[in-house]
């Protein structure tokens, strides 16, 4: 018998979340962002749920090729573009749309002789200060790009620094002012802008984290009104029970002291499974469907939970670490991180199964 821990990926949840994006940004096309192996869910696993997406965006060339090999015929966008001249050949062979954020990339395209012209997304740094041309340089970059033989259509994109917590109008204004006279599709919105900034929706939106049901802010409360569904459930079982007297402590570092007699459940899940070691006492879990919380320090292979609210629970009881009942952000936030990181960090040793729901393969919809 393997350890009782496992993750389940719910394809209907991803389909539901994608539909919600499409209703929310009703006049935009959707790049489904599946970088980082679909935020830890697995590209091949998630793929059947993407049938209604207009394009797929990611940043690893290997992942892009995997998506083509799965049979995807619609656009694929490389969010960071190419990294070296040889990448142009792959982009050409697999019909990838490449982001262009600097002149080095333009030079690689200029030197290339692809069989067909390569469509690009020209990226503006409108204030994030990570990748892209400054607004003042943008039109010049567009001119240079449009003079390059290997380049086909030129879309215009930018990325927000704080769409999750505040005003982004200043970045939109920078973008609009610098692109006023340029043709091409516009793409600005990550998940947060999809949910909260309709002015940023434009021609294409680029949601990632909300497809998986996690909050762009890292705070579960902020997405309560949107009926997003968790794409991943991390579950395990109780493998041991301890009864403590008042004054006794639990686990490494003796960080938790029982203030009364307590029943404690030992769960087969630890930081080597991807559960955050920094999760403090009080972080929620459900045991046999009843909400309770962890106590004591998370160790490599186990963590401990208070069984007071569920006196009937014992060895073999089911535990949800995150999923439908405990939002991944409810674990992330007290641990000082965001749901994104926990999903991406699901450990390889955790067996993953697929809850396929009502199947409809991407091929079922014509391109
Ligand atoms: C990751 C990423 C996204 C998606 O971000 P979410 O916050 O997960 O929606 C969109 N655009 C770019 C350029 C990205 O790198």
Image: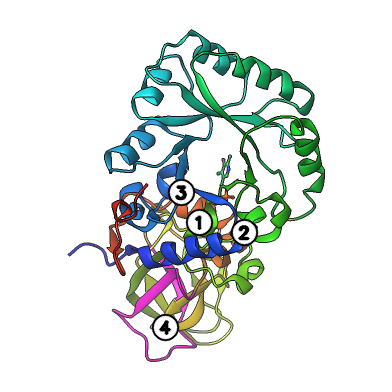
Q: Nearer the viewer, mark 4 or mark 2?
A: 2
Mark 4 residue crowding within 10 angstroms, few (<14) / some (14–19) / many (20+): few
Report helix, strand or loop for mark 3: loop
Decide if ligand 1 comes within 8 Å of the CB at mark 1: no
> What residue did someone put label 3 on?
54
Q: Is residue 275 left or right of residue 192?
A: left
Assign a secondary structure to mark 4: loop
Mark 1 or mark 3, earlier in chain: 3
Foreground label between 3 and 4: 3
- Quadrant of the rendered structure where residue 215 is? bottom right
Q: Disc 3 and disc 4: Cα gap in Å?
A: 37 Å
* Residue 147 in the image, given as x and y percentages of width and height: 60, 13
In primary-sequence order, the first of circles 4 and 2 is 2
Q: Which residues are magenta?
A: 302-325
Residue toward you, 67 or 23: 23
Dot 3: few (<14), some (14–19), or many (≥20) neighbours within 10 Å?
some
Name the residue: 40% across, 21% down: 116
Mark 4 or mark 1, which has the lower sequence index? Answer: 1
Give the spatial CA distance, label 1 vs label 3. 38 Å
Q: Is residue 279 visible?
A: no
Residue with the mark numbered 4? 289
């Amino acid at each position: 018998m393997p350890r009782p821990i496992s993750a389940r990926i719910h394809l209907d949840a991803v389909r539901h979340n994608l539909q919600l994006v499409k209703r929310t940004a009703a006049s935009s096309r959707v790049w489904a962002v599946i970088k980082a192996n679909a935020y830890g869910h697995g590209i091949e696993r998630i793929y059947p749920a993407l049938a209604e997406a207009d394009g797929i965006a990611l940043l690893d060339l290997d992942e892009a090729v995997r998506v083509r090999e799965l049979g995807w015929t619609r656009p694929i966008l490389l969010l960071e573009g190419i990294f070296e001249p040889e990448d142009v050949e792959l982009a050409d062979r697999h019909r990838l749309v490449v982001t262009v954020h600097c002149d080095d990339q333009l030079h690689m395209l200029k030197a290339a002789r692809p069989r067909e012209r390569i469509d690009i997304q020209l990226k503006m740094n409108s204030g994030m200060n990570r990748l892209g041309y400054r607004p003042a340089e943008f039109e010049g970059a567009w001119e240079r790009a449009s003079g390059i033989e290997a380049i086909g259509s030129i879309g215009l994109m930018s990325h927000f620094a704080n769409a999750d917590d505040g005003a982004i109008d200043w970045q939109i204004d920078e973008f609009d002012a610098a692109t006023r006279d340029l043709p091409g599709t516009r793409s600005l919105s990550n998940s947060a802008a999809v949910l909260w900034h309709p002015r940023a929706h434009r021609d294409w939106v680029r949601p990632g984290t909300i497809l998986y049901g996690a909050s762009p802010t890292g705070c579960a409360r902020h997405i309560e009104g949107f009926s997003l569904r968790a794409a991943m459930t991390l579950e395990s079982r109780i493998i041991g029970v301890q009864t403590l007297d008042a004054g006794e402590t639990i686990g490494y570092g003796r960080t938790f002291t029982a203030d009364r007699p307590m029943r404690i459940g030992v769960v087969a899940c630890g930081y080597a499974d991807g559960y955050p070691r920094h999760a403090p006492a009080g972080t929620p879990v459900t045991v046999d469907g009843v909400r309770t919380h962890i106590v004591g320090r998370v160790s490599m292979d186990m963590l401990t939970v208070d069984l007071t609210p569920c006196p009937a629970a014992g060895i073999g009881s089911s535990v949800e670490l995150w999923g439908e009942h405990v939002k991944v952000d409810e674990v992330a936030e007290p641990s000082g991180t965001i749901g994104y990181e926990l999903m991406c960090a699901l450990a390889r040793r955790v067996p993953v199964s697929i809850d396929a729901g009502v199947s409809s393969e991407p091929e079922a919809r014509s391109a």
